[in-house]
Image: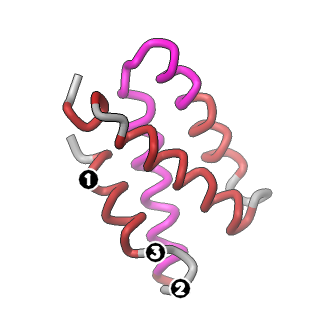
Amino acid sequence: MNDVATNGKLEKVCREAQAKLQKLDAEKNNDISSKLEWCLGSYNNDKNPEGLIEVGGQALTLLKSYKKKNSRQVSKKLIEDLEKVTTV
C-alpha cells in the first residue's frame, strides 16, 4: 500500500472530488460520483486503495474538462491534489 493511501489523503481528496462533481451537475456526473462513493466505502472496509486510485483518476479527467470550460468551477488545488493521489 502506498503512503498516500496510508495517511488518509487519498480518501479525503476523493471525498472532495465527489462533492464537487455532485455540486457541478449531479445528474450528469452520477456514474462517477456513485463509483467514488462505492470505492470510498470499500476502502473504509479493506484499506485497499486500488479502486479509489482508478476512479479518482476518472474523476480527475472529468474535473479537468470542467476547469477547461470554466476555470472558476474547479479549484486548482483540487486538481493538483487529485493528480498527486491518483498517480502512483
Residue drawn at x 20%, y 32% is 3
50 to 54, vertically: above or below:
above
Residue 36's spot in the image, x, y percent?
57, 39
Q: CA distance from mark 1 to mark 3?
A: 15 Å
Mark 3 residue element:
loop
8 to 62, vertically: above or below:
above
Of the residues under marks 2 and 1, which one precedes in the sequence?
A: 2
Q: Which residue is mark 1?
A: 84
Residue 78's spot in the image, x, y percent?
42, 64
Going by the image, does 12 lie left or right of 23? left
Mark 1 residue element:
helix
Going by the image, does 68 lie left or right of 86? right
Residue 33's spot in the image, x, y percent?
64, 46
Residue 60 shown in magenta: yes
Q: Which residue is mark 2?
A: 72
Residue 56 shown in magenta: yes
- Viewer-proximal residue among 25 and 6: 6
Q: Which amino acid is tagged 2?
A: Arg
Q: Which residue is mark 3?
A: 75
In the picture, the disc for residue 21 is none
Q: Tell me where the magenta segment starts and ends, as one range.
A: 39-67
Q: Which amino acid is tagged 3?
A: Ser
Mark 2 residue element:
loop
Residue drawn at x 33%, y 58% is 81
- Look at the numbered discs 2 and 1 and tell me whether their residues touch, using CB distance below 8 Å: no
Q: CA distance from mark 2 to mark 1?
A: 21 Å
Residue drawn at x 70%, y 64% is 23
